[in-house]
Image (cartoon, grey):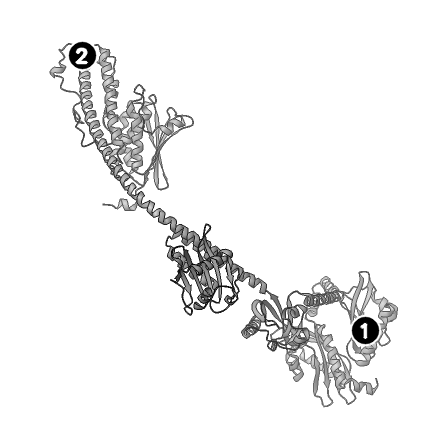
Amino acid sequence: MDETVVKSLYTPNCQQEAINLLSKFAANLPGIIFQVLQQQDGSVLVLYVSSGCEYLYEVEPEALQADFRVIYNLIHPQDIKAFTESIAVCCNTVTPWHWEGRIITPSGKLKWIQGTSQPERQEEGAVLWNGFVLDITDRKKAEEKLQESEARYKAILDAIPDLMFRISRDAEYLDLKSEGANITLSREEIVGKHVQELLPSDVAAISLEAIAKTLDSGTLQTCEYQLTTPLGVRDYEARLVVSGEDEVLAIVRDITERKQGEIALQNLAQKFAKAFSCSPDSITISTLQEGRFIEVNDSFVKLSGYERDEVIGKTSFELNLWVDDRDRLNLLQELQATGVVRNLEVEFRQKSGKIITTLLSAEVIDLDGVPCILAVHHDITERKQVEAQFLLSAQRDRLLAETLVRIRSSLNLEEILQTTVTEVRQFLQTDRVFIALNNTKLGIRTLAESVDPKYPSVLGWSTNDEAYLQEVRNLLKDNLVRVVEDITEMSVSPKVQAHCRKFQTQASLAVPIMLGNELFGALIANECSGSRHWQPIEIDLLKQMSEQVAIAIQQSKIYQKLAELNTNLEHQVEERTSQLQQKMQEVEKLHRVKDVVLHTVAHDLRTSVMGNLMVLKNLLNQGMGARDWGLGTGDREKRAQGRIIEEISPLSPPNPQSPSPLIPRGGPEFPNPQSPILNPQSPIPVSRSIIERMIQGNDRQLAMINSLLEINSGEKPGMDLKPEPVDFSILLGTIFAQLQPMLTQNQATLKNLLPADLPLVMVDASRLDKFLAHLLTHSLQNNPPGLNFILSATIEGGMLRTQIQDDGVVMSKLECDRLFDLHVRDPQDCCSTSIGLKMYLCRKFIQSHGGEIGVISNRKRGLTFWFTLPLATSSTTNRP
């Protein structure tokens, strides 16, 4: 190489160019590219180290350039000797340097590296080292694994995509590394051949030029080309470095995917450019620090009103774009904190001075090392105006709704009118709102007003000037809504003008209050500070409010009429109430008389009937034996027991005001047989059948008398019960033991399935036995002997549900539904009248305890009576 050429390579310009080339090469190389100059005195000057130094060595390139000996501190102690010797040999022989060894990074990572360099002795005796260092840790690990598995070693080699060629200056292939690369030719077909023999002419020309440049400049050369392969057209990149005298090392990599990615990125950049220029939203790029515009799109020009050349190079403050400078500060703070801002609502000032509202989204980007802001402004001025209109409409609707509620809920007209003018003035943000009413006798009078204290009040003002009144009426009549934006431009009489000057009215909005076709008054809003443009929504509000006020006035009038009618109605009601109370007192007296008559007659009849029964039965028993009359002992006992059950009312206590029965309960049933009335010596001129019929008739009459007494007692408001907590299992066991003779007499059985651990129940124990006797008697009297009962109980919803099931005859649903109703059966029915009543009294007994009762007809046979009773609570059980 010519000395002049060599010297020119190390001029400042060439050095900078070489560094730039190295930087581009190093950006895509998984390692470090370096250039080191060893001067004649032995000192070492690091001319260049690529950025891969930080990744590979975990050392900043600047630190390595400042002190080359940092490398020695990283080399593994076992490899430092080989490294030193390789450097010494290379310096003495000026031959290519190649070394592999281990390093330990500052973070403690162990890495294998491979260093390659081609030293070149300079004219002044210095040695220039150009080379690269690769991270071969993975490869070394792979080599270690190769000792374990040859198949794995082959797979790793096949995975290495790059081809490596040693090529002479004459473009002859000296050697190659093709393992793992997609190559169709064998090693023998390549080594010893010329580049032009294997590559297309255009690719061969590119390769020859790159080889020459690499050897002549001693720097890395890169070239790209395309080849047609069995897989189609593929892109390749060849990186050439000097690997020996008149020899280069070419690293060939398939970059088809990378090229495709670059094309996609280029297309994306074109799309971004189109999106930037065609976006309907304003997009700007400005410096982060100053806010100086670098680029803007056409939408920004349209939005701001500034031309592009008026903006580029200027700051937003110079253009006075920010309405509030604090928005710019908030934007910067948010970007510094998160790097991104989304939908920040800010106000900007256009060139014309108009204020607009936008949603600002921004991100920090880097342009040639300068931090910039990419900002997108979405104009929402119209949307904000619409939202304001919606808000205004919502406030209007709220005001109308509240006014309507007040009108419906209040009859105080003065309060309604005053609240109306107050809220209308607040809604309109005007100086005065008042309501004036028109009266044919009193003229115009102001009833309600809300006014700014700075301006005179019109409250209480009135006039009966007929000319003035007529003019005002005509103004409102001819114009359903009177809109005046500037009072000075209104053509009115001097009186009206004087009135406006007196009360400092500058603009006015008046809406008539109509009652039918009659002008009743007006709802008026005044602006006293200056002229005003009244918006349609404001006019519409006053129109609707005037309608509500008219409704309030009509309602007030109606209320006055109703008050008058109500006064008359109250007098009538008082008279009717007095008459009704008098009638009720009369009915109450009649009920008391009825009770006295019923008890007196019933008890007197009862005494007489019982006396007849005793006489007849005594005669029957003394006149002839039971067998003579065809009656067995069991029949007599059954009739006697039935009579006792009928005579004693178990659910209705005896009336203390009723006369006592002829024979006290528990006394002798028959009189003394030696009584002269029943002397067995006396003749009986009556046949046996007649006496039997007389006994049956007296029995039926006694039962009917008892039924009348029980009906009267059962219809009283509630029973005199005394419920208390009881052990239900023990109580029922005791009761059914007392009823066992009745069951035995009817050949009936009772199976008790009650659990022993039932909770306490609130019930009047003294009357529960009679209640259960009525339920059993109903089943016994409606079925033949041999009936079977099953008793069970469960807890449901805080109540004890008890069931008594029999296997007798069934009933229809209608009969089940009416069983507990109050009704008097046919006297000729086989069942006595008292039985129907007793089922009604059973229901009264259970309902008085707060429970329910019913009967279910089983599907196959029999009935199931059920009833519920409340469980005892802690408060009831602790009660003294």
Instruction: Identify the residue shown where x is 33% and y is 25%.
Output: 779
Circles 1, 2 touching at the beta carbon (< 8 Å) = no
Mark pair 1, 2: CA separation: 156 Å
Q: Residues within 10 Å of mark 2 (few under 14, many from 20)?
A: some
The residue indicated by pointer 1 is: 166
Q: How many marks?
A: 2
Residue 400 image point, x, y percent: 46, 55
Say left or right for 207 vs 494: right
Residue 2 image point, x, y percent: 84, 86
Instruction: Identify the residue shown where x is 20% and y is 13%.
Output: 625
The residue indicated by pointer 2 is: 623
Per the image, label 1 sits on a secondary structure element best described as strand
Task: Report if residue 193 is visible in the image.
Answer: no
Which numbered disc, 1 or 2, marks the residue closer to the eye?
2
Say left or right for 618 vs 332: left
The N terminus appears in which quarter of the rendering?
A: bottom right
Task: Report if residue 37 is visible in the image.
Answer: yes
Q: In terms of sequence position, does the residue under pointer 1 or pointer 2 come before the other?
A: 1
Dividing the picture into quadrants, the one containing residue 677 is: top left
Residues 551 and 314: in front is 551
Residue type pointed to by label 1: Arg
Dividing the picture into quadrants, the one containing residue 673 is: top left
Residues 526 and 148: in front is 526
Per the image, label 2 sits on a secondary structure element best described as helix
Residue 90 image point, x, y percent: 75, 82
